[in-house]
Amino acid sequence: MKIAVISDTHSLPLPQKLTKALSEVDLIVHAGDICDGGTLQVLKKIKEVKAVQGNMCDETLKKRLPLKEYFECEGVRIGVYHGHGPAKDALTNAQEQFKDVSVDIVVFGHSHQTLKKEIGGVIYFNPGSPNDVIKAQFPSYGLIEIHDAKIKIKLIRF
């Protein structure tokens, strides 16, 4: 199973390299701040999407999307949360959201900064942003590959 992980697209156009890559996965996970329904529809035309609301999403999207998501893929438990409050606290906030849930991976966003860190047996992964040219260090997205309950996570810069 291949899962593309994106976050913080903020209603900006998606890079062509990203949309091509998204067409080659089994699932798209968006960790919030899609910001508008149009971008969500574009993603859904490419592949199945699991998404959460972000702090910058319009009210219509906030009503449609959960604050956090939990699902399993091939025996791997995945939590998804955007983040709220100061960007420097994004990791701490993601940890807090899933402290009482058994997860293998927590995908989060909000800070626009990439991070892959294992804490207490849980992998915390922030893919950064694929189209932010102000806060992000570079445009990026993530790829989670699951095979026989083994996890491989890649950060892809472009």
Image: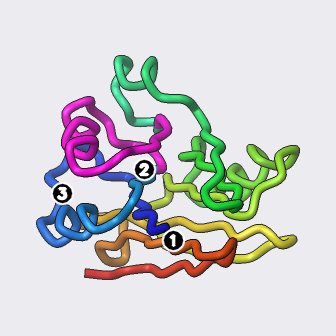
Query: In the displayed structure, does residue 119 sit left or right of residue 70?
Result: right
Q: Which residues are magenta?
A: 31-53
The mark found on residue 144 in the picture is 1
From the viewer's perspective, tell me whether residue 151 is left or right of residue 66.
right
Q: Nearer the viewer, residue 98 or 19?
A: 19
Q: Which of marks 2 and 3 precedes in the sequence?
A: 3
Q: Which residue is mark 2?
A: 30
Q: Looking at the picture, which amino acid does disc 1 mark?
A: Ile
Q: Is residue 21 above or below residue 80?
A: below
Judge the density around disc 1: few (<14), some (14-19), many (≥20) Cα neighbours within 10 Å: some
Type of the residue with mark 3 = Leu
* SS assignment at label 3: loop
Looking at the picture, tell me which residue is in the foreground, 51 or 135. 51
- Secondary structure under the numbered disc 2 in the rendered image: strand
Residue 11 placed where, x, y %?
A: 22, 43
Question: Could you say which quadrant of the image residue 49 lies in?
Answer: top left
Give the x, y percent position of residue 119. Answer: 80, 72
